């Protein structure tokens, strides 16, 4: 079988678990990480039993910098927060972990595993 180039880098909207039942949820647009980005991130990722993923704080930040491309309905006390890398610090830690884990999972699972 021939080696195939990575594909599937079309950004998609991700709804955090805490927002699933909200009719107008906050959503984050994510894009699967490429091979180079995963290579950079690899020293920051720990695969645990049961397929769980843990990351260092640096790894979480790197994953977000590489794969978080937009958001909608992300607000603070004054209203909508403009999408900008400098505003990533306004995402709470639990959500940062959730988004980074999603990025690593979607980027490392092969197509057959995603379908199951």
Image (cartoon, grey):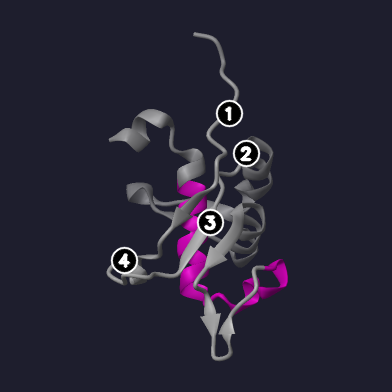
Residue 8 in the image: state x and y as whole percent. Answer: 53, 34
The residue carrying pointer 4 sits among few (fewer than 14), some (14 to 19) or many (20 or more) residues within 10 Å by Cα, namely: few
Q: Residue at x 66, y 74 (%)?
A: 87
- Horizontal side, residue 84 vs residue 96: left or right: right
Is the Cβ of the residue at disc 1 closer than 8 Å to that at disc 2?
yes
Q: Mark 3 or mark 1: which is in front?
A: 3
**Magenta stretch contains residue 65:** no
The residue carrying pointer 3 sits among few (fewer than 14), some (14 to 19) or many (20 or more) residues within 10 Å by Cα, namely: some
Q: Residue at x 43, y 32 (%)?
A: 110
Q: Which mark is residue 29?
A: 3
Q: Which residue is mark 4?
A: 20
Q: Which residue is mark 1?
A: 6
Asked which secondary structure carries label 3, the reply is: strand
Measure the alpha-carbon separation of dots 1 and 2: 7 Å
Q: Range of the magenta residues? A: 84-105
Task: Choose the circle earlier in sequence order: 2 or 3.
Answer: 3
In this view, 24 is above or below 46: below
Asked which secondary structure carries label 4, the reply is: loop
Q: Which residue is mark 2?
A: 34
Asked which secondary structure carries label 2, the reply is: loop
Q: Mark 1 or mark 4: which is in front?
A: 4
The residue carrying pointer 2 sits among few (fewer than 14), some (14 to 19) or many (20 or more) residues within 10 Å by Cα, namely: some
């Amino acid at each position: 079988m021939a080696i195939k180039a990575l594909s599937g880098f079309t950004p998609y909207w991700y709804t955090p678990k805490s927002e699933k039942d909200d009719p107008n949820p906050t959503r984050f647009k994510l894009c699967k990480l490429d091979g180079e980005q995963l290579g950079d991130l690899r020293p920051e990722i720990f695969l645990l039993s049961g397929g769980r993923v843990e990351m260092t704080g640096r790894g979480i930040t790197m994953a977000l910098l590489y794969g978080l491309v937009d958001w909608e309905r992300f607000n603070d006390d004054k209203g909508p927060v403009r999408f900008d890398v400098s505003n990533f610090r306004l995402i709470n830690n639990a959500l940062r972990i959730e988004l980074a884990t999603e990025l690593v999972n979607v980027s490392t699972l092969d197509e057959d595993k995603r379908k199951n």
